[in-house]
Amino acid sequence: MNLKEKIRVIEDFPVKGISFKDITTILTDPEAFDYGISEMIKAFGDVDYDVIVAPEARGFIIGAPMALRQHKGFVPIRKPGKLPAETLTFTYELEYGADELQVHVDAITPGLKVLVVDDLLATGGTVKAVKDMVQKLGGEVVGMGFLIELTGLKAREMLQGIRVESIVQYEF
Amino acid sequence: MNLKEKIRVIEDFPVKGISFKDITTILTDPEAFDYGISEMIKAFGDVDYDVIVAPEARGFIIGAPMALRQHKGFVPIRKPGKLPAETLTFTYELEYGADELQVHVDAITPGLKVLVVDDLLATGGTVKAVKDMVQKLGGEVVGMGFLIELTGLKAREMLQGIRVESIVQYEF
């Protein structure tokens, strides 16, 4: 299957100049959704991991099914105020301003092997923050997987030392 | 399995007096996560549906794996500004103030049989809005499923005529 054909590209969303990659057209196509999740799993077929970690909200759509199918734990990364138990709060810089993410501290135990996934790798700011959070709690990030990668934004330079896999690539 | 034992209850979150049902302890336990999703699917084993619809963000953790396993489409309901194609925006009242949700209009075609799912049925305000959105686009809501139901909040009274299933019940 050519997964790229199942992605809807919408120009100038959310702002002018951005060519938005819409995965909802994959989700409404059971064959395509299954193929995407299967390819994500296959990309890390030789990697040993304990849990899958994903940031809200689209990351949940990829990470939860992967975890369930692979019989691994799933750890959600959330915006502040959503996780009820003790959290680590992490502030990271965006192009304009800053953002915050939280993770339950008891969800990442020292030595835990973590696969970080999301739907899209763009600048990499969010998943870099997720990686730093996992590492701060003593977890080991053994890989990062994305359905789509925007290669022209060169996020991999920021994620050096980590194995990064993507299923479909666009320049921008 | 007693799924209730896998749910972490945290008092006074997000505000005093609320006894928060934390499902992240299910998600980090692969047996429990699998059991919960399997029970959700089993609860609608006799129901014919085309797609699963779920509101962000925890709804995605339940709905996406169910859809994938049942080989159905998955339609995310999102906060405003997240969905890139043509959307229906729906405003609904909360206890204090109002909230808005969006759905891609081409994701719900007339006559489509829709199963609405979320992690928790509390007052039912959000899923009532989801139901109204689906119906406004001509879809047929054939059921609503929840991992957890807070029976004391009597959401079912607002969802009359719809089959509602839940796996674990608390009064509040």
Image (cartoon, coloured by chain):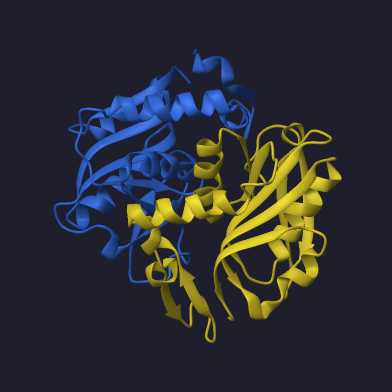
Chain colours: A yellow, B blue
The residue shown at (71%, 52%) is A143
Query: In the picture shown, does residue A68 fall above or below A151?
Result: above
Q: Quadrant of the N terminus of chain A?
A: bottom left
| Side of A157 relative to B25 (left or right) | right
Query: Is B153 drawn above or below residue A3 in the view shown?
Result: above
Is B168 situated above or below B76? above
Instruction: Give the quarter of the figure containing the C terminus of chain A.
Output: bottom right
Q: Can residue A77 be seen in this view?
A: no
**Figure check: B96 above or below A152:** above
In the shown orientation, is residue A136 left or right of residue A51? right
Of the pair B124 and B58, the residue shown nearer to us? B58
Residue occupying the point 54% across, 86% down: A17
Relative depth, front residue between B142 and A48? A48
Q: Residue at x 63, y 50 (%)?
A: A44
Rendering quarter of residue A24? bottom left
Between residue B149 and residue A58, name the one nearer to us: A58
What percent of the width, then of the height, locates residue B145? 34, 32
Q: How many marks?
A: 0
Task: Give the image location of residue B25, x and y in percent.
Answer: 62, 27
* Residue in view at x 37 percent, y 36 percent: B124
Where, by quadrant of the figure, is residue B48 drawn? top left
Residue A27 position in % (x across, y down): 39, 56
| Residue, far front | A46
Q: Which residue lies furthest to the bottom in this view?
A: A17
Q: Observer-nearest residue: B97 or A2?
A: A2
Query: Is residue A102 among the parts visible in the rendering?
Result: yes
Residue A61 in percent (x, y) is at 49, 50
